[in-house]
Image (cartoon, rainbow, N blue to C red):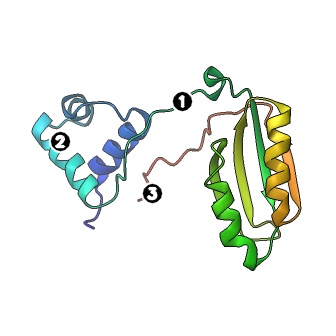
Amino acid sequence: MSSLDATDRAILQILRREGRLGGAEVGRRVNLSQPAASARIRRLEQDGVITGYSAHVDPGALGLTIHAVARLRTTQANIAPALELFSTVAEITRIYRLTGEDCFLLDLHVADARRLETIVDAVARFGPVTTSLVLREYDSPSAPSFTAL
């Protein structure tokens, strides 16, 4: 991968917030022509710096009104079976493998408490589970700016 300059970092910051912008608008914001901006974006994609684009979906709009996180403490032997279970549960939106006492942190969006209970009970086959409800989510004021790259 080639090194990133200030313009590359600025492009990444823009696309991180507004991934649907076209090359012309990105170029305007970083003082490049549309072809030059598009070429840089293509290079960042080819180099694996930009790995994809996605839509942010409001779980509440889908009827998934309970947001919870669950921590699982398990054994090495249960890692693969736990991952297999996680892959079958649509309400698990993020899976983090952790260091420390807990092995996994799961981000869950569920329709109701009964569904949350069903998922927690299924996960608990692999070890102790600690579940917390998310009261509110805040945007991080210190989200990576890529200026340190």
Q: Position of residue 121 (x, y in %)?
A: 85, 51
Give the residue at mark 1: 57
Q: CA distance from mark 2 to mark 3?
A: 23 Å
The answer to which quarter of the image holds residue 132 is top right
Say which label, 2 or 3, has the lower sequence index.
2
- Which is nearer the eye, 128 or 5? 128
Q: Position of residue 80 (x, y in %)?
A: 66, 71
Residue shown at the point (79%, 51%) measured from the top left: 70
Mark number, residue 38: 2
Q: Is residue 12 visible?
A: yes
User: Label 3 crowding class (10 Å Cα cut-off): few <14, some 14-19, many 20+?
Assistant: few
Q: Residue type at mark 1: give it.
A: Val
Q: Does the CB distance between marks 1 and 3 fall below 8 Å? A: no
Q: Residue type at mark 3: give it.
A: Ala
Q: Is residue 33 visible?
A: no
Quadrant of the image containing the C terminus: bottom left
Q: Residue type at mark 2: give it.
A: Ser
Residue shown at the point (70%, 71%) measured from the top left: 79
Q: Closer to us: mark 2 or mark 3?
A: 2
- Vertical placement of 20 versus 45: above or below? above
Q: CA distance from mark 1 to mark 2?
A: 27 Å
- Which is nearer the eye, 24 or 95? 95
- Vertical placement of 147 versus 53: above or below? below
Q: Closer to us: mark 1 or mark 2?
A: 1
Q: Does the CB distance between marks 1 and 2 fall below 8 Å? A: no
Give the residue at mark 3: 148
